[in-house]
Image (cartoon, rainbow, N blue to C red):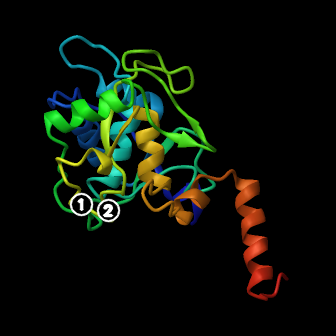
Amino acid sequence: MSGREQYETGKVSTTYEQKSIKKRIEAFLIDNVGKIVTREMIIQVSKDPKTGKEPENWHQRLSELRTDDGYTILSKRDRAFLSVEEYVLESLEKRKTAGKRVLPTKATWSTILERANNCCEWRDGGEICGLSNGSIDPIGGGTVKLTPDHMQPHSINPNADPESPEQWQALCGRHQVIKKNFWDSSSGKMNTIAILQALPHKEKEAALMFLLKYFGKDLA
């Protein structure tokens, strides 16, 4: 048995009342370890248990469970048989992650926001994101909340100086997720594995064919 056949479909069997969105999602995934869960399920369990309000940033919290907490959470980028917005917590084993995160001081963060004109500083092809704090993200949806980001990924250098504005940047939630997965802003080094994981199926096949030719492997 291989592919999708080896996975059952998960279910929401309880109300999750943990204090944070991330903790509610974590508890739900642990209850459904090794099973396929959907975006709708995750949104349902991550709602505020008191108000019932749906979170705008659930996807960022899911990403943090991967990158900060070390969980292996599969998605379509990892397994072709998964549909878009389906996920599997592969096991309860956690990967080794970097040390405890530091944050810039309040004075440093104020300097960063002043430098950034209170806007996201993400650069792509020379263009700056520029979404302002409190605005609506036209692509990712939800209200923009700027947060401090290491210029160099935490996994590479967990010891950024809290008092050095040059070692930090202000990013919106959507670009925080992209940065964690794909890019080192200080060195320009790309995470090629994460980029390949994110490619559509046809582009993954094209990349495979290129590498087979590059290394002189038999294409038969």
- Residue highlighted by disc 1: 158
Residue 109 vs 213, above or below: the answer is above
Residue at horizontal 38%, vertical 27%? 43
Distance between mark 2 and mark 1 Cα atoms: 6 Å
Q: Amino acid at mark 2?
A: Ser
Q: Can residue 179 be seen from the camera position used here? A: yes
For the C terminus, the quadrant is: bottom right
- Front residue of 174/56: it is 174
Residue at horizontal 36%, vertical 57%? 152
Q: Can residue 35 be seen from the camera position used here? A: no
**Image location of residue 16, percent across then percent down:** 21, 29
Q: Identify the secondary structure beneath mark 1.
A: loop
Q: What is the total number of numbered labels drawn onto the structure image?
A: 2
**Image location of residue 202, percent across then percent down:** 76, 55
Mark 2 near mark 1, Cβ–Cβ under 8 Å? yes
Q: Identify the secondary structure beneath mark 2.
A: loop
- Front residue of 95/164: it is 164
**Image location of residue 134, percent across then percent down:** 37, 15
Residue at horizontal 43%, vertical 15%? 135
Q: Residue furthest right?
A: 220
Residue at horizontal 79%, vertical 89%? 216
Q: Quadrant of residue 1?
A: bottom right
**Image location of residue 177, percent across then percent down:** 43, 43
Residue 73 vs 172, above or below: the answer is below
- Front residue of 143/76: it is 143
Q: Which mark is residue 155?
A: 2
Q: Amino acid at mark 1?
A: Pro
